[in-house]
Image: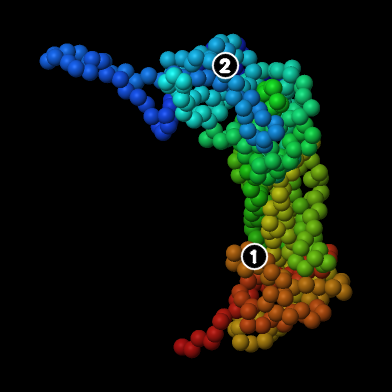
Amino acid sequence: MGHTLFGALGLFSLNILLYCGHAQGVPQSVLTVSPSWTSPGDSVTLTCRWRFFWYKAVPDMSRYSYYTYELLAGGTTGTEQDSYILHGQTHTAGYQCRAGRGDPVSYNQYSYVKFVWSGGVNPAASLTVSPHRLQHFSTESLSLICEGNSAEWRVKKADEDGYVSSCSDWGEMTGSTCNIDIRARSGVYWCESATQSSNAANITIHSVRHPVLTVSPSWTSPGDSVTLTCSVGPPSAGWRFFWYKAVPDMSRYSYYTYELLAGGTTGTEQDSYILHGQTHTAGYVCGVGRGDPVFYTLYSDVKFVWSGGVNPAASLTVSPHRLQHFSTESLSLICEGNSAEWRVMKADEDGDVLPCSYWGEMNRSTCNTNTRASSGVYWCESETQFSNAANITIHSEFIFI
C-alpha cells in the first residue's frame, strides 16, 4: 500500500528530533553553586545537572497495550542535552525518555510514549485498510488487517489528543484483523507485533446522522406535483439519494416497509425528487449512499403528503361530520374501502405519528377517541392504501363568551 494514501506523517529516512522535559517529583533536582564564598563583585555559577536517557518503546504483547523500554544505541550513559536526533527514520516507532542524576543514577519516571508515524511500506509489518480509503462513516463496516513476520498482532489508535488505545476499546480483534464498531473515531491507526510497527493510516471517521426528508407541499389537490428533498450532514458531497414509498406493515404496530420508487435502484445525484400527478395521501422516505459497492446510511423518518380527495379504495369518515371538536365529546374515525384490516394514524404539529391505541380504542375499522386525543392530521391505512386525510382541531374545553 503506497504512502500516497496512507502517509500519516510521511517520514522516509528523515531526521527526528526528540525533546525530553523532566517531571517534577522524585528525584529532586540538586543545585550546586561555585564558589560558595565570595568577595564583593565575584561571579557565581549555578549548576543543575540532569542526564537524559532515550528509549524505544517495544510492544509487550502479553500485557494488553503496554510497552517495554529499550535504550537507544549508545544511550547507557545518557546525554546532557535534553534533545536527541534520530537519523534515517524509516518506519513507525514509539519513543520515551526519562531523566536521572547522581552516581549511582537515580531516575524520575518514564515519559508517556510518543509515536513517530510513517506511511512507508514495512515488509515485516503492514496495515491494510478495507475498504481502501481514509474517509469512512461510523455506520459502515471497516476492517484493519495486519500482515507480516508475526503470528500475533494488535491494532492501535492515537486520537487527536495523543491518547493511545487498542482495538478492543472500539472494535473486535479476530486473528490479525480488527473489525471496528460504532465506537471508533478519527485517529492514526497502525499494527504492532512484538518486534515491529506497521505503516500508519490517518483515518477520518464521520458520524452519520439520519437524513432528513422534507415534502412540499404537504397538502395537495389531485394532480399536483410534490417535491421531495433529502438532506444529510457534512460531508454533503459524493452521496447518491434513494427515494422510497412507505408501505404500511400491518403486522408491526405502526411500522412501514419501504419500496423504491420507479427507476430508483441506482439513486439520483440530485437531493430532490419530483412526484408528478399526486392524487392520494402517501408516505415517503429517503436514504443516502456512497461508494462502490454502495454503502447506505440510515433511512429518514417517514414524511406524509396528505390529500383530502376521495380514494375509493380507502376512505376516512369523521363522526360527527366536522373538523372542530372538543375533548369531552365522543369522536369516531371510520375506515372504509377494499380491506379487511385497518389502522387509524395521527400526525401532530411536530410531525410525530401515532396510531389510534395512543389516544383511543380501535374496534375493527373504527377508532373511538378518548380524552387523550389532540389536534392533528388523521387518516386510515390498510396494507396497500392510504385514505383521505382530515386536519382535525380538538379543543380542550368549551370557551364561553
Q: Is residue 129 left or right of residue 160?
A: right
Q: Is residue 28 left or right of residue 91?
A: left
- The crowd level at tag 2 (other Cα within 10 Å; few <14, some 14-19, many 20+) is some
Say which quadrant the N terminus sits in.
Answer: top right
Q: CA distance from mark 1 to mark 2?
A: 64 Å
The correct choice, above or below, for 135 with respect to 75 in the image is below
Reading the image, the residue beneath label 1 is 352
Q: Position of residue 374 (x, y in %)?
A: 61, 76
Please count the marks in the image.
2
Reading the image, the residue beneath label 2 is 72
The amino acid on which the numbered mark 2 sits, given as a three-letter code, is: Leu
Q: Earlier in the sequence, mark 1 or mark 2?
A: 2
The correct choice, above or below, for 327 with respect to 391 in the image is below
Task: Report whether residue 72 is seen.
Answer: yes
Q: Residue 117 lies in what quarter of the image?
A: top right
Asked if the residue under mark 2 is in contact with the one under mark 1, i.e. CB atoms within 8 Å, the reply is no
The correct choice, above or below, for 4 with respect to 382 in the image is above
Furthest residue toward left: 40
The label nearer to you, 1 versus 2, is 2
Q: Secondary structure at mark 1?
A: loop
Q: Position of residue 362 (x, y in %)?
A: 76, 79
Q: Position of residue 347 (x, y in %)?
A: 66, 67
For residue 332, the mark is none
Q: Secondary structure at mark 2?
A: loop
Q: Is residue 133 left or right of residue 80?
A: right
